[in-house]
Image (cartoon, rainbow, N blue to C red):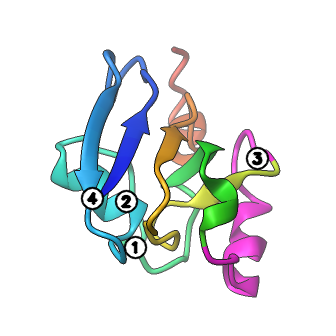
């Protein structure tokens, strides 16, 4: 099992979280299993950017993003060099520190102001 630390997110995980996930599980599925309701508008098919996360630790331990994921990431709000789509990034053996951005494309379009 691999340790995942989720940094506090005002709406989805106000206190942050610490849990373990099975290697090979997508970060998105690991978050959802912990009742951290990360958006995944395309049902985890790499067709949107709503599940965008930033890896504060452990980024280099993940397999490289595919060209399709890289193309989708270019559309993500708040993109950083260590950004991934959580539906595509699979948990490995190295602990991860995950930050869920304050906004996603969906939240920006819907006019969320928090």
Between discs 2 and 1, the one toward the N terminus: 2
Under circle 2, the secondary element is helix
Q: Residue 111: where, in percent of width, then height?
A: 55, 28
Q: Residue 92: where, in percent of width, then height?
A: 46, 69
Mark 4 Cα-neighbour bin, 10 Å: few <14, some 14–19, many ≥20? many
Residue at 29% across, 34% down: 18
Between discs 4 and 1, the one toward the N terminus: 4
Between discs 3 and 4, the one toward the N terminus: 4
**Label pair 2/4, CB-CB below 8 angstroms:** no
Mark 2 Cα-neighbour bin, 10 Å: few <14, some 14–19, many ≥20? many
Between discs 2 and 3, the one toward the N terminus: 2
Q: Which residue is mark 4?
A: 21
Q: Residue furthest bottom?
A: 67
Q: Which residue is mark 3?
A: 79
* Segment colored magenta: 63-80
The quarter of the displayed image where residue 54 is located: top right
Closer to viewer: mark 2 or mark 4: 4
Q: Residue 14: where, in percent of width, then height?
A: 33, 17
Closer to viewer: mark 3 or mark 4: 4
Under circle 1, the secondary element is loop
Residue 44, which numbered label?
Answer: 1
Q: Nearer the viewer, residue 39 or 18?
A: 18
The quarter of the displayed image where residue 47 is located: bottom right
Between discs 2 and 4, the one toward the N terminus: 4
Mark 1 Cα-neighbour bin, 10 Å: few <14, some 14–19, many ≥20? some
Question: Relative to residue 95, is residue 112 depicted above or below?
Answer: above
Question: Relative to residue 103, is residue 93 depicted above or below?
Answer: below
**For the residues marked 2 and 1, what is the alpha-carbon distance in whole angstroms?**
8 Å
Between discs 3 and 1, the one toward the N terminus: 1
Q: Which residue is mark 2?
A: 28
**For the residues marked 3 and 4, what is the alpha-carbon distance in whole angstroms?**
25 Å
């Amino acid at each position: 099992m691999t340790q995942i630390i989720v940094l506090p997110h005002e709406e989805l995980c106000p206190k942050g979280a610490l849990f373990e996930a099975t290697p090979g599980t997508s970060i998105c599925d690991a978050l959802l299993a912990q009742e951290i309701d990360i958006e995944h508008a395309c049902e985890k098919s790499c067709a949107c950017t709503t599940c965008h996360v930033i890896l504060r630790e452990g980024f280099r331990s993940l397999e490289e993003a595919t060209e399709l994921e890289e193309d989708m990431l270019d559309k993500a709000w708040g993109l950083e060099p260590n950004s991934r789509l959580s539906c595509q990034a699979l948990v490995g053996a190295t602990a991860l520190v995950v930050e869920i951005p304050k906004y996603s494309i969906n939240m920006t379009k819907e006019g969320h102001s928090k």
